Amino acid sequence: MSAREPFHRLWKKEISPDNLGPGTFIYGEQAPYLRKLLLEVIEEARERGEQLQLKPYFLFDSDWAQILDEAQSPDMFLFTTRKLLVVYFPEPEEDDPQLAEKACRQLVAPFEKEIQRYFASPPDGVFLIIIYPGRLKKGNRLFDFFSKLQTGTGGNLRLLEMKTPRQPELTAWIHEELGKRGRKTSPRAINRLLEAAGTDLLLLNQELEKLSLYSGGRTVITEEDVQAVCVFQKTYDRFAIEEALESGSLEEALSITARFLAEQPEAADIINYFTGLSRYVLSLARARAEVEEKKVPIKEVFKKMKPQLNEGWSLFDRKLEAFSTCLKAFSRKDLNDLVRELGRIDLKLKSSDLNAGIMIETFLVRFFQLRDRKKSGA
């Protein structure tokens, strides 16, 4: 296969009926994106007049005994129809390093012998695709089971990892997806989109669809469109105020706040705006505590704060540098004082009729006085 082939086309080729074998075990952060690719494969097969039917199974309500019995049942579909059976492991609800081990112990281990027998002599015309939505590596029981099955069944099972593409590949994919919709965009807008939605391809595809609809008759999707539409951007330009706090100026932060207040927001919206501002200052305070008390490197703290940014990306490096510079500008006492001030303002916003704009602007002045103190020689 060509090394230059785009990742999404390679994945789609791997699951096309012409290339599928009796079994394919697919894993990786982007494995859920296979759902979209499967629908495309089915639709294209039907347009060519091919008989291809898909049936999903979810391991939280079906077990392997049922799945394998139906896979070998000659009357499940017409004999002229190729059968594409897709087995889904449950998607994780949280970042649990033991999740794969638990999945193997609960969902696979009781049926290992049945699965081995099936792949030792699989039926003709049946393609069994097994999807685990997460990372796996050698030494993990789930990975090792299917890896050994791959080598012990004479090629009846293949393994395919769908991992997050590198930044240039992901950027090219975004351009291509927008091109299908008659749209184009800029590098800054793409950076904003990735910062807002992360690297999940399913989520990004949904956001691109919304952006295309939002742009109406316009061809170019702008950074402002991303800020107005994208899923995590509903906190009233959170990324703009965060960037101003991090590496911008007091004038920029006051301008962003003034534009927000000029729209005469509801009280709840003002609370949300203040919460976004507070969240960043609190993250600085927590980072300072981890760096000083627990001796955790700033990069590791940042990676936990920004899990949607991939290390090695230019966006990751830029944001890490800005965050590190901002963090170093404050002492531990500075940040503790700012956090206490945030608490006082939060109480006043929720319990008094004092002017919210003045309180927020006063806090911003204090924040930048402390942040830029070294620059001014104070």
Image (spheres, rainbow, N blue to C red):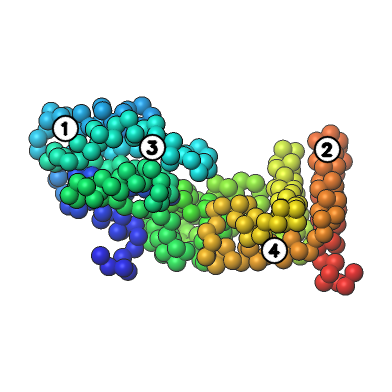
Residue 36 in view in this figure:
no
At x 59%, y 66%, the residue is 317
User: Residue 149 appears at what percent x and percent y?
Assistant: 26, 45
Q: Earlier in the sequence, mark 4 or mark 2?
A: 4
In-front residue for pair 216/183: 183
Label 2 is placed on what type of residue? Answer: Leu
User: Residue 7 appears at what percent x and percent y?
Assistant: 35, 60
Task: Report, in whole angstroms, how far the alpha carbon at label 4 lies from the one at label 3.
Answer: 40 Å
Judge left or right: residue 346 versus residue 2.
right
Vertically, is 363 above or below 39? below
Q: Secondary structure at mark 3?
A: helix
Q: Which mark is residue 347?
A: 2
Label 3 is placed on what type of residue? Answer: Cys
Q: Which mark is residue 104?
A: 3
Q: Residues within 10 Å of mark 3 (few under 14, many from 20)?
A: some
Q: Which mark is residue 72?
A: 1
Q: Residues within 10 Å of mark 1 (few under 14, many from 20)?
A: some
